[in-house]
Amino acid sequence: MSDLPEHARENQRYWNGMAHEWVAAGERNWAAAAPTWGIWKLPESELQMLPADMSGMDAIELGCGTGYVSSWMARRGATVTGIDLSERQLQTAERLSTEHGVPLTLIHGTAEAVPAADGSFDFAISEYGAAIWCDPHVWIPEAHRLLRPGGTLVFLGNTPWVAVCTPPSGAACEEVLHRPYLGMKRIDWTQVEVDPGGMEFSMPVSAWLRLFRDTGFELVDFLELQAPEGESSTAFSVPAAWARQWPAEHVFKLRKR
Ligand SMILES: C[S@@+](CC[C@H](N)C(=O)[O-])C[C@H]1O[C@@H](n2cnc3c(N)ncnc32)[C@H](O)[C@@H]1O
């Protein structure tokens, strides 16, 4: 991985540096009775991210972190590969895989160039992995390459609304437009005052749709997620009151043509 692009080098450093902060959440999610998704922990029954029965399927998680999404797929019968850029995150995934007796194939690498043959998988997924940390114009074609014809790609990440409404300081989302929507792509959080982060990607919805079409994906569903009624927390700089009015997270479900 010596020739990683700038954003991947920065994100690898960032994620290795804070992997210890994700251990407890990883442990909770590995032990959870049923999958929940995103910053508001929305139930699988609502989002339907995973096929109920994945027996006989080859699945890959792109940016698997501590591997809990991979564990949910393996428990549904899939043979699962997880790839992640952070060796520290993978250490947690490896440990939890052993402790829970759920075998996973874990690869240290970038989801922008996965060391697997064309058409190796039936199902690919990312929850805040490649979905936000990889260049869409690289990882979406890469996911397409990895899938068999008719295969599914599902991903969940934060919306361009969040990027537009986050102040330049990196403080919590406001009801104010802070940056242009049209033309946005790479967002550099490395120098912000509040909770500096890595380099993320977010695009206008029209840019996503064009990319899917040009790559050879058919859009099966598009969800804009709302914070649950009665929720009052601020999750990852998104106040629930804000996310009752604007979608902080979206899900794309795609089929390879
Ligand atoms: C928020 S975690 C997502 C995993 C899991 N759903 C979770 O929430 O813990 C983000 C993960 O993306 C990984 N990541 C960032 N850039 C990546 C890349 N280019 N290729 C693969 N993984 C990447 C990070 O190392 C991190 O483990």
Image (cartoon, rainbow, N blue to C red):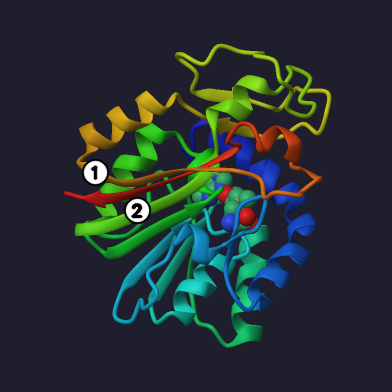
Residue 87 image point, x, y percent = 62, 58
Mark pair 2, 1: CA separation: 9 Å
Whether residue 67 is situated above or below residue 75 in the rendered picture? above
Q: Secondary structure at mark 2?
A: strand
Residue 247 image point, x, y percent = 58, 36
Q: What kind of residue is marked 2?
A: Leu
Residue at the image point whose x is 61% and y is 13% from the top? 179
Along the line of sight, the residue nearer the viewer: 55 or 109 = 55
Say which mark, if any, is on residue 217.
Answer: 1
Q: Within the image, what quadrant is residue 195 found in?
A: top right
Q: Going by the image, does 97 lie left or right of 206?
A: right
Q: Within the image, what quadrant is residue 213 found in?
A: top left
Residue closest to the far front: 229
Along the line of sight, the residue nearer the viewer: 2 or 27 = 27
Q: Within the image, what quadrant is residue 67 found in?
A: bottom right
Q: What kind of residue is marked 1?
A: Phe
Whether residue 139 is situated above or below residue 202 in the rendered picture? below
Along the line of sight, the residue nearer the viewer: 214 or 84 = 214
Q: Going by the image, does 87 lie left or right of 60?
A: right
Q: Going by the image, does 85 lie left or right of 165?
A: left
Residue 152 image point, x, y percent = 30, 57
Say which mark, if any, is on residue 153.
Answer: 2
Tell me, yes or no, whether the two marked residues, 2 and 1, touch with CB atoms within 8 Å.
Answer: yes
Q: Secondary structure at mark 1?
A: strand
